[in-house]
Image (spheres, grey):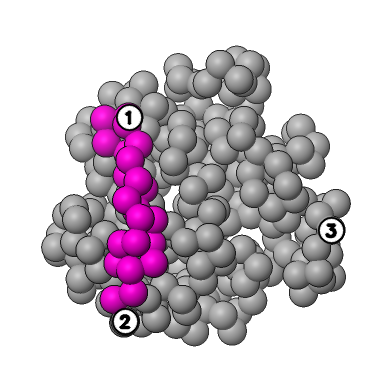
Amino acid sequence: MKKLIFTLLVLMTLPCSGKVIKVLAIGNSFSEDAVEQYLYELAAAQGDSLVIGNAYIGGCSLEMHLDNLKTSRRSYAYRKVVGGVKTEEKKVSLQRIILDEPWDIITLQQASLLSGIADSYKNLPTLQRQVKLLCTNQNVEIWWHMTWAYSKNFKNAQFEIYGSDQERMYNDIVNCVRNEVPKANITQIIPSGIAIRLMRYRKGDILNRDGYHLSYTLGRYTAACTWCEMLTGRIVDGNKYWPSTITMENAKLCQQEAHEAIFMQQIRQYATF
């Protein structure tokens, strides 16, 4: 019954599968974790083709992205996956990256440290408008990438802004997604943060490689599964692709929790209307 309800929701909100979907992430190392590996292969395994772009600056915040856009600063590494092959061009402006393709979907996200700080979202409406105006596809959709809380044992002075508390950081991120992101007229959320949280329940707090970036196996694969289902509208649970570094059992678990995360986010979103 739950899958039936979810299927009806995605049919109302997501692009059709079986076509080329062009998606650009304007992000940082957390978008690198999510889209630069596994995502293309997951979509291809179910009959969809993605053109994936990542406008990358490590630790880049919404404020920095907006400033870079205003000043045409050539400070991005432009990573692109086409036909399963990843390329990188350095010292590229955000304008040129946005103009490179008629993107169907462009995602925004906050720097991880600021992801649960409401005041840090004040520039999001302006950034959303400017990105949308610059894109050559008049039907482009701007989505939000909800990132994840740090691991419980992460030892870093910056984590103290959340009391070094994973649960507090997660709840603060959820509140920003619920209260701040809609102010920028963004309704579609890719809930990687929820999927990672669910996987932590199932496997323990082992989804990070350094306390905040995702592990190269389960962490990144879980995020890619979440993106794949959101972008294509196909339920990822049952997808036949997983890397050789992950067992079939663990791959199925990642797929299930990615699907569950999207279901939870969609129900929460529609429950607010």
Lower position in the chain sequence, tag 2 or tag 1: 2
Comes first in the chain, label 3 or label 2: 2
Q: Amino acid at mark 2?
A: Thr
Which sits earlier in the primary sequence, circle 3 or circle 1? Answer: 1
Q: Nearer the viewer, residue 245 or 232?
A: 245
Front disc: 3 or 2: 2
Q: Which residue is mark 3?
A: 155
Residue at which label 2 appears: 71
Residue 185 vs residue 62, the one in the foreground = 62
Q: Are marks 3 and 1 in contact (CB under 8 Å)?
A: no
Say whether residue 266 is visible.
no
Residue 65 point in image, percent of width and height: 41, 73
Cβ atoms under marks 2 and 1 closer than 8 Å: no
Residue 120, how many percent across, how many down? 56, 80
Q: Amino acid at mark 1?
A: Gly
Which residue is at a point 65% across and 22% down the rendered structure image? 250
Q: Which residue is mark 1?
A: 84
Q: Secondary structure at mark 3?
A: loop
Q: Residues within 10 Å of mark 3 (few under 14, many from 20)?
A: few
Of the residues shown, which amino acid type is indicated by label 3?
A: Lys
Q: What residue is shown at x 46% (from left), y 67% (from top)?
A: 273
- Which x, y percent locates residue 20? 21, 37
Report helix, strand or loop for mark 1: loop
The residues colored magenta run 72-94
- 31 vs 177: above or below: above
Magenta span: helix, strand or loop, mainly?
A: strand
